[in-house]
Amino acid sequence: MNKINCNVDNCSHNSTGVCYANRIDVGGKGVTDACETCCGSFLDKRQYSTLTNNTNTDGPCDCIVCSAEKCAYNDNKLCTADTIQVNGHDTKIYTETICSTFKVK
């Protein structure tokens, strides 16, 4: 199972719906709803070439740093969810992405 599933089609780290960044940073300090979160690692393919080569491992990303301290999956700024879903439509900047797995404590 992939740790990070992503439907942000124009993210440079996205390859066939799976994130291949070295790590992702989920933003959302003080948020109480998934729509207030974001993937701080988003890079637009239109401005950056395809970056689907994870240099730390041979596989997809499995390191999720999270600043959404009110999320039930946040344990000392690391995500403990088995898998997460990152979403965004016609995304131009990272704040237009969301972590749909966010669940308030």
Image (tube, rainbow, N blue to C red):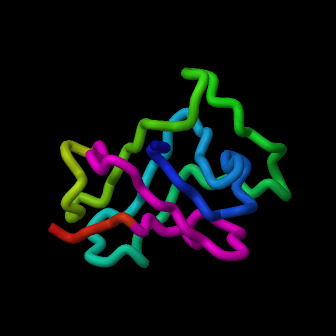
Residue 52 lies, in percent from the top left, at 71, 38
Q: Quadrant of the N terminus?
A: top left
Please name the residue shown 51% across and 62% down the image.
86
Q: Quadrant of the C terminus?
A: bottom left
Was residue 97 drawn as part of the magenta stretch in this picture?
Answer: yes
In the displayed orientation, state which residue is furthest to the left.
105
Was residue 60 drawn as part of the magenta stretch in this picture?
Answer: no
Q: Is residue 89 above or below residue 25?
A: below
Q: In screen coordinates, is 51 left or right of 19?
A: right
Please name the residue shown 67% across and 50% down the image.
14
Q: How many marks?
A: 0
In the displayed orientation, state which residue is furthest to the front.
1
Q: Residue 104 lies in what quarter of the image?
A: bottom left
Residue 50 lies, in percent from the top left, at 80, 43
Please name the residue shown 26% across and 68% down the image.
103
Q: In screen coordinates, is 85 left or right of 47?
A: left
The one nearer the camera, 49 or 17, is 17
Q: In screen coordinates, is 2 left or right of 10?
A: left
The one nearer the camera, 70 or 72, is 72
Residue 27 lies, in percent from the top left, at 41, 59
Q: Is residue 85 above or below residue 63?
A: below
Range of magenta residues: 78-100
Q: Is residue 57 above or below residue 77?
A: above
The one nearer the camera, 26 or 30, is 26
Q: Residue 49 lies in what quarter of the image?
A: top right
Residue 28 lies, in percent from the top left, at 36, 64
